[in-house]
Image (cartoon, grey):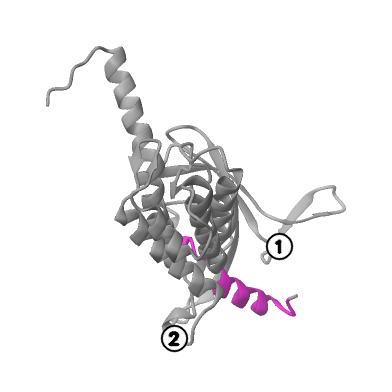
Amino acid sequence: MFRNPDELKAYVIENYREITDSRIDESHWDLQCTSCKVTRGFQLIRRGESGTYTQYGSGEQHFSRDFHAPVTYIFKCPVCKTYKLWVALEMQLRHEDQKWHDHIFHLTSLPSEGIEEIDELPEEPESLRIAYRQAIRAMDANAHLAAAAMFRRALQIITREVLGAKPGNLAGELQQVVGKTYKGTTVTGNFASNGYVIKEAGNQGAHPDKDPDLLEFTQQDAEDLQNIFMEIVSELFIAPAVQKSKAEFLARRKIAVKP
């Protein structure tokens, strides 16, 4: 609970990411589409404010905005025409020049920011897709330590349930699966080294040590960890799917590739 608006502002600044610089102008924002994966000038098609209406004796109504309530934005992708909804808090902060400046902080979004679904992930076990979605949603909620833990969880599902490692500690499982074949793809040492990074980051999130540099897990840390996880996904699931599609296309079109 907040005792006053200043406590609300302080809480938002500490726990949520600022998105002021993502705004290009009053009608366009620089965002990434989670459907077509393109970053463009998204069109702001609707902006909603909270407030109350007061009716005067003449019957005229006046809208009084609640400046402490969140604002909703609905954006439309200029490429695939899908849309997303953001909930944000707009506030004015006094800068060193003693002037008030507008700032916007992202609270949540529908759907979550980041790519929630990866088509190439295996349908089974279902727990893999669930763990990955939970990691993305945790990032969207600024729960970056939770995201690290869920990326680690997704990795262990891959080693045990997809690649068949004998359950033990994750470091041992990563070494077990090197050299194994999954649907024609051989697991490389690169998989194990990327997996080790994810394991260590997840462990830091669950059991932080006394190093002050490691006590905070930032948004950038979470985004970098997601990219490392995507390297694993690309090596094991996406690249083979692309090669399969290419081979099928060449066969259909009777194209012989010269060596």
Judging depth in this view, the residue of 96 and 32 nearest the camera is 32
- Rendered position, 7 above or below 246: below
Q: Residue at x 51, y 64 (%)?
A: 148
Residue 40 position, x and y percent, is 39, 43
- Rendered position, 54 above or below 33: below
Q: Is residue 160 magenta?
A: no
What residue is disc 1 on?
66
Q: Quadrant of the C terminus?
A: top left
Identity of the residue furthest to the left in this view? 259
Q: Is residue 192 left or right of residue 259?
A: right
Q: Is residue 61 visible?
A: yes
Q: Quadrant of the N terminus?
A: bottom right
What residue is disc 2 on?
211
Residue 196 position, x and y percent, is 39, 64
Q: Residues within 10 Å of mark 2 (few under 14, many from 20)?
A: few
**Amino acid at circle 2:** Asp
**Amino acid at circle 1:** Asp
Q: Residue at x 38, y 39 (%)?
A: 238
Q: Is residue 11 magenta?
A: yes
> Which mark is first along the chain, 2 or 1?
1
Question: Of helix, strand and loop, which one carries label 1?
Answer: loop
Question: Of helix, strand and loop, which one carries label 2?
Answer: loop
Give the residues drawn in magenta, as a range.
2-20
